[in-house]
Amino acid sequence: MIDPATEKVITKVGLGGKREINLAVQAARKAFPKWSASAPDERTRIILRFAELIEEHQDEFTELAIRDGGIPRAIAETCPFFCALFLRYYAGWPTKITGQTLPSTPHGKDPADVLAYTLREPIGVVGGITPWNYAFGMEMLKIAPALATGCCLVLKPAEEAPIAGLFLAELAHQAGVPDGVFSVVNGLGHQAGAALAEHPDVDKIAFTGSTEVGRLIVHAATGNLKKVSLELGGKSPVFVFPDADMDLAIPGVAMAGFAMSGQNCVCGSRLYVHEDVADQVAEGIAAFASQLSLGSTQNANTDVGPLISAKQRNRVEKMIRNAKKQGATLVCGGARGKGKGYYIQPTLFDHCKPSMELVKDEVFGPVIAMQRFSDKDSFEQLAAMANDTCYGLSGSVWTRDLEAAMVMTKAINTGQIGVNCHAAMDPSMPFGGTKESGWGAEFGEAGIELFTKDKAVTLMWN
């Protein structure tokens, strides 16, 4: 494993493949009957203890997050709190997973002679495949609802960030999660990941990652027609109207594009600004970017960390070069950071066109593509700009105009959208995408539904 901030090898982990996946799935299948039948309050107790252990080890969490994904310390420090918060939210669910009693008259029976109800049951053995950006958090999105619903989980972390899952598995074991209920197999995607996705004894795959790999997951899952949930890529539109509070909007849209070095699926990389304030916004973002610290992830004052790998840095640099060739105006950034590490400066391009690669494709780097609109553009036309993409994950609208806020949030085709905020998330709020940004929603009750199935029961006595 390479630390992306220093380009040095910091550790090695075992390389699992089809054999290791098979052993983990067998263990999960063996553990499932007892775990799925466990008392709800027992699962709650274990999950709450898991959250306590995470907080007790928050310093280790932070250090591992820094090294596992090149996350700046200030962001890495949020990892244990996010994971504990998420666990505590789902710890409340085991006693609330219920079915319904329904009026029913099958075969013309008298309703008094029929009892019809539903059960909501754990779906079974789940394969979780997760990405490297904010690894602890992405893995917890699979772990917490799986444990709460009584499922067993085999987790295959991203090969670029293999440490987080191992540490979470160790703490889960200490909390009392039985053997086989939660296992981790590190390995390459085309080997361990593929073996998990196609395994006939896996009932569901929960995947977070690129749309390209998501398609491969779907094909691999067709063998036994296992259920699949996908949280995939995004190309989030961000609109700044002329009446927006610029003291709020400028840093808000800047960090929508630059946070996590742009390596997040909700990155606000498509910026649309009214022409009356476009120069002000561009200058403001550039000034804001100049104040961001790009450097050591160990430094508490670092704002922007490295990209995950040399390969990813090269990809982003190629997109920057292409944007220049295609006529976009470079406002700030556009170059590597100094010294070792896979750093790219926070970058803003103005006067972009819808046909440009930078506007159409997910960058996964700290690069914002800005376009301008005018009073001639109706809300419908602005929404068409926002929806002119294969993605539909997140977005934001910055305005003090209630009509603009309400019309745009309804018209933009995404699974999540914010007004005067971007990517505001809470464990209770569903999070998922439309179009090629995924299937299903995580977080909240929606997350419980992904890991459960309905069974209809009908009793007759006459």
Image (cartoon, rainbow, N blue to C red):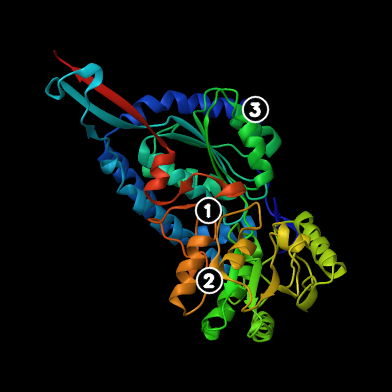
Vertically, is 449 above or below 387? above
Q: Is residue 87 left or right of residue 299?
A: left
Residue corresponding to mark 1: 136
| Residue 18: mark | 3
- The amino acid on which the numbered mark 3 sits, given as a three-letter code, is Lys
Name the foreground residue: 36 vs 23.
36
Proximity of marks 3 and 2: CB atoms separated by less than 8 Å = no
| Residue at 75%, 70% in the rendered image | 352
Name the foreground residue: 263 vs 41.
263
Q: Is residue 49 left or right of residue 242?
A: left
Q: At which x and y percent is residue 28?
A: 47, 28
Vertically, is 97 above or below 59? above
- The amino acid on which the numbered mark 1 sits, given as a three-letter code, is Phe
Residue corresponding to mark 2: 397
Residue lying at the far left of the rendered structure: 112
| Residue at 45%, 73% in the rendered image | 403
Name the foreground residue: 173 vs 439.
439
Closer to the chain start, of discs 3 and 2, is: 3
Vertically, is 313 above or below 451? below
Query: What secondary structure is marked by label 2?
Result: strand
Query: What secondary structure is marked by label 3?
Result: helix
Question: How much space separates mark 1 and mark 2, taking CA atoms?
Answer: 29 Å
| Residue at 51%, 67% in the rendered image | 408
Residue lying at the far right of the rendered structure: 325
Judged by depth in the image, the label closer to the viewer, 1 or 2, is 2
Sort mark 1 into few (<14), some (14-19) or many (20+) by Cα contacts within 10 Å. many
Q: At which x and y percent is residue 349?
A: 75, 73
